[in-house]
Amino acid sequence: MEPRNQTVLEFHLLGLSENPDLQPILFGLFLSMYLVTVFGNLLIILAIVSDSRLHTPMYFFLCNLSLVDIFFSSTTVPKMLVNIHTQNTAIPFAGCLAQMYAFHLFGTMDSFLLAVMAIDRLVAIAYPLRYSVLMSPHICGLLVGGPWVITNLQSLVHTCLMAQLTFYAGSEIPHFFCDLMPLLKLSCSDTHTNELVIFAFGIIMGLSPLSCILVSYICIFRAVFRIPSAQGKWKAFSTCGSHLTVVSLFYGTIFAVYLQPASPTSSQKDKTAALMCGVVIPTLNPFIYSLRNKDMKTALRKLGSKAVLSQS
């Protein structure tokens, strides 16, 4: 079979399951989760924007995380729902590259924002008197803007390199979206450069946020243990509870999936990790950050009261 020019190339996404009996269940499940993700994170954003008491660095970063979670989930779930509903698994080459670009942009941005939020908690607990200076609006802007530039650069490099490859027409991707490694396996070109770049970016983009989070929490633990009273220790550490829960879910999933012996079911591992990080965790984040946070619950109640009053 001869490779066809990529400008007319079309892939077929095999999805999560080819069992026709499961399709209605999968459609209902992921539609529900997607709606919860979008509306839940939008509520978080609206609550933060509308309540002046939440105009602090911590909630600025949370607002950005909620926005990224909406985009992250929107990268894969709507296309998956359309495929299930129409029974049409085709995706054009350009659409595939766009999906791959967006998935790695927002997925990596998620991890960088978690690292930035860890730095924020460290400064708040270890240097409370200098917090307003160290976390000024300018610094907060740089802490968010820098990762946006870096993650866009990463996605752009991956996408440009992938666009240079040729593929067999009508290739089937054993995934529910276009990802780097499944696409490389379908290429009939030399993928050595792509693999080296993926490895290099994987080390830098994977280890940098994780290292930052680990170092921040080591410093946080040391600062908390220096607080003399038990009540003071609990009050300081309780501000990290929601963030620590999300970090544990995010990285716990990655470690649980990939730190296992190699097996023929590697594509299933990729699907599991992508589902957890790109669908399940963005759905859970609004609950984690609202149910465990008194200020957020108050802001959401105020937002609800304003909505009721505006309708009456």
Image (cartoon, helix red, strand yellow):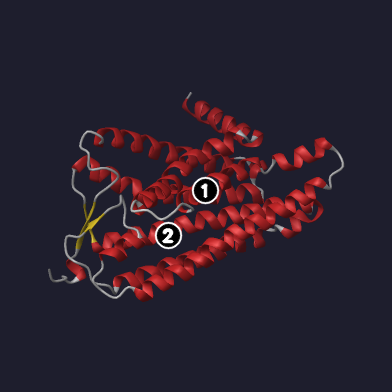
Residue at x 56% of width, y 65% of height: 146
Percent of width and height locating residue 26: 30, 36
**Mark 2 = which residue?**
104
Q: Nearer the viewer, residue 182 or 112?
A: 182
The image shows residue 34, relative to residue 250, as above or below, that is: above
Percent of width and height locating residue 178: 31, 57
**Mark 1 = which residue?**
250
Amino acid carrying label 1: it is Phe
**Quarter of the rendering containing residue 95:** bottom left
Amino acid carrying label 2: it is His
SS type, badge 1: helix
Residue at x 54% of width, y 63% of height: 147
> Residues at badges 1 and 2 in contact (C-beta under 8 Å)?
no
- Horizontal side, residue 157 vs residue 287: left or right: left
**Quarter of the rendering containing residue 192:** bottom left
Say which quadrant the N terminus sits in: bottom left
Residue 161, numbered circle: none
SS type, badge 2: helix
- Horizontal side, residue 111 vs residue 129: left or right: left
- Horizontal side, residue 79 vs residue 127: left or right: left
